[in-house]
Image: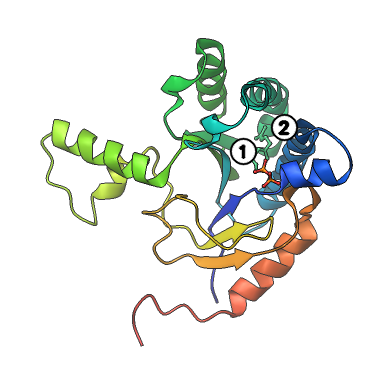
């Protein structure tokens, strides 16, 4: 049976969730951050999930109004400060992919410290994709390989990506759109795709559980017959 070792999620719909309730979009991000915790806890207690990668800020998200970008940065900083205790309690290792050099020194420092303090945790790796774009990651990986004088091939390429996470088994997108939006392009080559109309702030572990059940029933051929 298929094993959902690596689950990746495009968390879409925060803004619409808030607007529907007559609230500012940023309130949707706030609620979205709580859902990140709930889904991470579910995955940390799932016997087969090892990696959970979440698209938290794309290379395109800088185009949003400054107020929203500033809020997301502050939310992330506050959230990581608070989340450290949860990571340690739940034995979760924190990892990041994306080019964080564009973030404030304070946020970069918070990210690096959280990674360092959780590096020996083994139950689950929670990966936040921050200032992340799949093409950007591949281009940076090629540059690293060139600089190291290494001839890349399909076997050694992942070592040059931002983190060694392995292939994605399930890629989920909430919020109703059916596209990959430049997420994890290399690792999602054989991912099973799941799309739901549920907005991210309404996404519950029970829905993830149903998707995992469906995933287990799907036939994965990896190009073979
Ligand atoms: C998409 O919703 C969501 C984002 C661009 C950011 C994701 C951020 C969070 C889930 C909260 C912060 C996360 C952490 C880890 C602290 P959207 O704003 O594009 O929604 P819309 O499509 O309805 O406008």
User: In terms of image quadrants, where is residue 117?
Assistant: top right
Percent of width and height locating residue 204: 79, 55
Would residue 80 be found to the left or right of residue 125 on screen? right
Identify the residue at horizontal 45%, vertical 21% (top origin).
Answer: 102
Would residue 186 be found to the left or right of residue 207 on screen? left
Identify the residue at horizontal 80%, vertical 52% (top origin).
Answer: 202
Give the position of the C terminus as an image quadrant. Answer: bottom left
- Contact check, label 1 and label 2, Cβ < 8 Å: yes
Question: Relative to 114, is 37 above or below?
Answer: below
Q: Nearer the viewer, residue 203 or 126?
A: 203
Question: What crowding class fits label 1: few (fewer than 14 Cα within 10 Å), some (14-19), or many (20 or more)?
Answer: many
Question: What crowding class fits label 2: few (fewer than 14 Cα within 10 Å), some (14-19), or many (20 or more)?
Answer: some
Would residue 203 be found to the left or right of residue 169 on screen? right
Percent of width and height locating residue 203: 76, 54
Which residue is most to the right?
Answer: 21
Percent of width and height locating residue 162: 38, 37
The residue that disc 2 covers is: 86
The residue that disc 1 covers is: 92
Question: Relative to 97, is 179 above or below?
Answer: below
Identify the residue at horizontal 74%, vertical 40% (top origin).
Answer: 32
Check disc 1 and report its element: helix, strand or loop: strand
Identify the residue at horizontal 89%, vertical 43% (top origin).
Answer: 21
């Amino acid at each position: 049976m298929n094993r959902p070792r690596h689950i990746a999620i495009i968390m879409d719909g925060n803004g619409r969730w808030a607007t529907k309730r007559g609230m500012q979009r940023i309130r949707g991000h706030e609620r979205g951050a709580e859902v990140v915790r709930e889904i991470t806890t579910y995955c940390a207690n799932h016997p087969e999930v090892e990696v959970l990668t979440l698209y938290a800020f794309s290379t395109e998200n800088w185009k949003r109004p400054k107020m929203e970008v500033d809020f997301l940065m502050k939310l992330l900083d506050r959230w990581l400060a608070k989340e450290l205790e949860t990571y340690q309690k739940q034995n979760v290792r924190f990892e990041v992919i994306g080019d964080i050099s564009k973030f404030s020194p304070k946020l970069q420092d918070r990210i690096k410290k959280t990674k360092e303090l959780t590096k020996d945790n083994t139950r689950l790796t929670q990966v936040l994709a921050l200032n992340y774009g799949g093409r950007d990651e591949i281009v940076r990986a090629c540059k690293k390989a060139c600089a190291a004088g290494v001839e890349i091939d399909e076997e050694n390429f992942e070592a040059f990506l931002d983190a060694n996470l392995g292939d994605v088994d399930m890629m989920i997108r909430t919020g109703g759109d059916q596209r990959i939006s430049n997420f994890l392009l290399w690792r999602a080559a054989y991912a099973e795709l799941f799309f739901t109309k549920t907005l991210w702030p309404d996404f519950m572990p029970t829905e993830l559980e149903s998707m995992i059940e469906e995933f287990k029933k799907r036939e994965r051929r990896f190009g073979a017959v």
